[in-house]
Amino acid sequence: MNKKEIEQTFLKLIEYTYIYGYEDYVKENILPNNLKKDQFGNYYIKIGESKTLFTSHLDTVGKQKLKVNYEIYEKDGHRFVKTDGNTILGADDKAGVTIMLNMIDNSVPGLYYFLIGEETGGAGSRLLAKYMFNMLSNYDRVISFDRRGYGSIINRQVGKWCCSNEFVSGLSEEFKKNGMEFKADPYGVRTDSAYFMAIIPECTNLSVGYFNEHKVTEEQDLDYLLELCNVCTKINWESLPVVREPENFDSTEPEYVQKVTDLPMYKLFNIFDEVYDIIYEEVKFLCANDNFFKPEKEMIFYDKNDLEETLNFIAIVHSDGSITLKKNDIKIKIKNIDSLKKNKKRLKSILSFSHNLYIDEKSINYN
Ligand SMILES: [Zn+2]
């Protein structure tokens, strides 16, 4: 594709907000006919021989499919796109989709996955990782094109290192050769490539030049996207170092057999959601494995800025609705969600884990 065609492709892709469940419309109207659909609803194509998996996602955040009215304007010598303020733009992640379509058009070797439901907890990538383990274990690296801003090579997400320093240096060098500056960014949260961290050695997410994603003020640097589209066809992806050992960010499955006296599963899910909300609200910790919640399972909480992983703690929702917070040998037992709510203002000091604590509605006991 030439520059004009790339730009037109991107603008066509953002004509509507395609929420989870509407990804097939993108395929019907814009994506090439030679893409195949997998059993989970993702679209993919394999080009040549390659050990690289490329991903972007077809869905946008939101509650309904809406028409997007956009305008192109100048800022800092670059052309940007934004909406009229009534909808999001959807450059997250149609920018990534555009880059991959141009790479396919240029026959860059790779397995290309256009995933569904990223914004609803990696619906497409989660199932792919779960059921296609053998196929995916042939791959050395997964590159997601789904990071805001400029020049980030995400090397950390869900509280774990997702690619090696050698990989980052190699990729940074490839970009530099082609006139672009990309460097390590350890402050990723989670995108599709995270779900492959237990299978594929080097997993990253690259900046694609969008800003303020998930908001009506979302904007895309159009000139940056055009440059990146061109450079991504020139990078020698296959030559990048493979050093990291695949490692899961999820905890092991608990031995849990449901008993008749247990609270119903939906209530336990609701309790976990409330626990997560309170922890995020009070101390801004994130849960690495919230999409894999089960009662009695160790749910891992981490601070995005804590690169040493010394602040991590575990939360367990038990089948009777009680809650345990724990770190190493120290445990805080909480009678139920209402007790946690009543003590939430104290959560910061509770999470210093200096004592074993039992918290019920009336008393706080140290032991
Ligand atoms: Zn995204």
Image: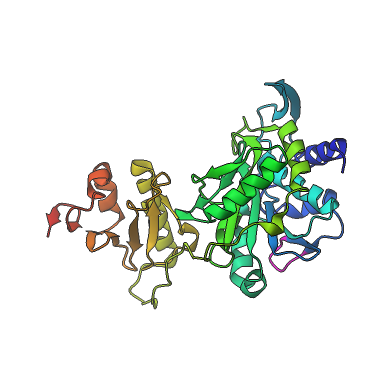
| Nearest the eye: 269 or 110 | 110
Q: Is residue 17 visible?
A: no
Q: How is the structure coloured here?
A: rainbow
Q: Main secondary structure of the magenta part?
A: loop
On the question of residue 41 being in view, the answer is yes
Q: Count every numbered label the image shows and give the total.
A: 0
In terms of image quadrants, where is residue 134? bottom right
The one of 3 and 255 positioned closer to us in this rendering: 3
Location of residue 267 in the rendering, given as x and y in whole percent from the top left corner: 40, 61
Quarter holding the C terminus is: bottom left
Q: Is residue 39 magenta?
A: yes
Q: Is residue 36 above or below residue 311?
A: below
Q: Is residue 357 left or right of residue 6?
A: left
Pick whichever, 169 or 33, lies toward us: 169
Figure quadrant of the N terminus: top right
Residue 261 on image: x %, y %: 33, 74
The image shows residue 247 at horizontal and vertical percentages of: 49, 65
- Looking at the picture, how far across and down is residue 240, in whole percent? 65, 56
Residue 39 in which image quadrant: bottom right
Side of 102 where 329 appears, left or right: left
Residue 340, placed above or below residue 292:
above
29 falls in the magenta region: no
The answer to whether residue 44 is above or below residue 77 is below
* Residue for point 45% across, 63% down: 293
Q: Which residues are magenta?
A: 37-42
Q: Residue at x 56, y 54 (%)?
A: 166
